[in-house]
Amino acid sequence: MDERDGKHQDAAQPEFRPYHHPAAGWGAAKSVTEFLVRERELVNGPRAIMKMNHENGGFDCPGCAWPDDTKGLHLDICENGIKHVTWEMTRKRVDREFFAAHPVAELAEWSDFDLEDQGRLTEPMRYDPASDHYVPISWAEAFALVGRTLQELDSPDQAAFYTSGRLGNEATFLYQLMAREFGTNNLPDCSNMCHEASGRALQASLGTGKGTVDLKDWEMTDALFILGVNAASNAPRMLTALAEAYRRGAQIVHINPLVEAASTRTIIPHEFARMATFRPTRTGTLNLQPRIGGDMALVRGMAKAVLEEQKSDPKALDVEFIERHTAGFAEYRALCEATSWDEIERQSGVGRAEILTAARVYCEADRSIVSWCLGVTQHEHGVDTVREIVNLLLMRGNLGREGAGPSPVRGHSNVQGNRTCGIDHRPDEAFLQRLAGVCDIDPPRAHGLDTVGTVEAMHRGDVKVFVGMGGNFALAAPDTPYTSAALRKCLLTVHVSTKLNRSHLVHGRQALILPCLGRTEKDHQRGSLQATSVEDSMSMVHLSVGMKRPASPHLLSEPAIIAGMARAALPGSNTPWEKYVEDYDRIRDTMAQVLDGFEDFNRRVRLPLGFRLRQPARELVFRTPSGRAEFSTAALPDVVPVAGTLALGTMRSHDQWNTTIYSDNDRYRGIKNLRTLVFMNADDMRDRGIRRFDDVDITSTARDGSTRTLRRYKAIPYDIPRGCAAGYMPEMNVLCAIGDYSTQSDQPLMKHLKVTVEASQPAG
């Protein structure tokens, strides 16, 4: 059992006032201004705003992966993107004097906010166990330590190479090349924790691991169905698309246990007239609140309603599309007809009348898009749910035409590009053959370890070296104490980072912090300014060029760091690592030969807006066993909580980006000065004798029967279905046991934890 006391960085009194204002608007403007003042970036911040997400010489926002505007918008930005960039451009520095003044044992007691708030890392550092301090080390010595430790392993599979979504495409390609030339497919990444279910489901149904729509489709669709997405915080620029869709008459159905601010109204900051007159635009026409895990049943109900509608309206189904392009429809029809409305209502937590209303919207729309995020994927049955979404789209031919199709929302800049460019612990043979032929290596064929598998292997002692390119692995992964113990068992942990974070303090026997350039900074190699490419959530690939002088002259680019480690670990390598680093065009020339869809890469990526990767399913080409889009026939899972328990989902607050905490506030949910909380249905609180702001203990029960407890969290009444609760990651990651992952996707069950909540006992 693990017990932790709830603590938050700010001693100010917690507040909760339900939020009733439009998303974005003046609230966002005020928040950005306060943040720029706090960070003392009133010059560089506005300069960055004018360069971020611009097609000519701009840099790509290091926040979310929402596509850039295609019509020349000069303020294609959002509140959280500005905060993310300003956080990176801070003038604060974490240098050798800082580390000399603070031992690791002391830093371990600091809050996660305070760690990152110290500023940018300035030079490579090595952990010294004798003094418990990080001490300076030269780049050459750091690379030699990595190389020596890797070479001394008994097997290449005793190393794991983790990737965060911020890594650019060129660095991504070099990273996977280094790992595979070294001899392992142990390439865990953040996709293993977020959209793995989406990729596996879309691959099984359509033969592609990505969505098929682009931003122009969003501008043309008649109906949008948004599932498990908190757009105002996690993809704020989506608000523009939602507002424009509403104004042209599209129907917008939000499906989420919580009614988030993005599903009601917004004032888009770059719409100056509306800002000046405080005129909001609606961003939704219908809100449905399924129980946690109930999305699949709700979508099944919509499909059942479409079939019932066909009895009176033959056009409710696109029979021609189904017959020409799909397989398995007869079996799916039989499954829908055999699923009772009582079971659909029970499992979804939504009444039949409301589901029929959503289905009517779907049937009346000529073109529909279904978009989803982690609220759908981080469940045991995430793959089945995404496949059910595809089933619904196929029934009315909402694929392969403008304004229609599946549209997963990737939450981190270039996480989709990471997978495209080779970060995959289960690579396919065609890719490996091309890599072998072009790069003259013999890549391993055996599947490697994903995120959960890597943590378990480190804990067993089977993985002895962990290299992390970006991110904050110790906090992002599930079962925080277990993950921390696993990292501490390593011979060597290496973190390539821009700022100090918890993972640097949860280290192996030897540890390195290798500071890299940020997305906003100029990357000069041999006197020439380099550009890197990224892929957005809708498969557009474009260039990003930094605008600011690096935070320290001792920083290296991500490609340079990877090449340095590779040269040291692979002394006999024929790969031209130095030439790749001198000119990233050379990396792109090699990528063009290896990666499907990257032909003529260097020319196409320099086109205005870059280029879009081909999506065969959009062209009705299905790389499935049948050569058709395949209906699935999974049974509905039982997601109704056992009496006395709640289903708890973890999520970000608004003033947070992944594991980076900007403050203890969550404006859109009405929270101030508090993170250690649990949102609950008021009736569930009443049943347990819990009042607003009472201290409660939250205990999760894992599949193996073990329990984990968070103590003295504040209970907040919220508009959430009975039997459901929610709270913030990464604090609540401790509740997700390492063994509680989906058997379909191997994703940790962050959105569907089985918990009990009870009043805390008085202190003492």
Image: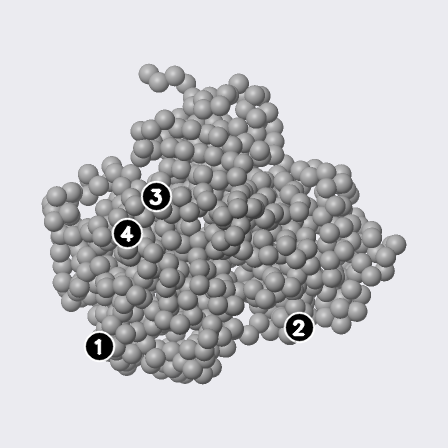
Determine the secondary structure under disc 4: loop
Residue 54 in the image: above or below residue 18: below
Query: In front: 234, or 156?
Result: 234
Task: Tell me where residue 733 appears, x and y as whole percent.
Answer: 42, 41
Mark sitting on residue 527: 1
- Residue at position x 56%, y 64% in the image: 215
- Give the amino acid type for the residue marked by disc 4 in the picture: Glu
Of the numbered discs 2 and 3, the one sitting upstream in the chain is 3
Q: Which residue is mark 2?
A: 620
Of the numbered discs 2 and 1, the one sitting upstream in the chain is 1
Point out the frontmost of discs 1 and 3.
3
As drawn, is 650 to the left or to the right of 222?
left
Q: Which residue is mark 3?
A: 34
- Give the amino acid type for the residue marked by disc 1 in the picture: Gly
As drawn, is 255 to the left or to the right of 747?
right
Using the rendered image of the protein, determine whether residue 593 is visible from the camera's viewpoint: no
Of the numbered discs 3 and 4, the one sitting upstream in the chain is 3
CA gap, disc 3 and disc 4: 10 Å
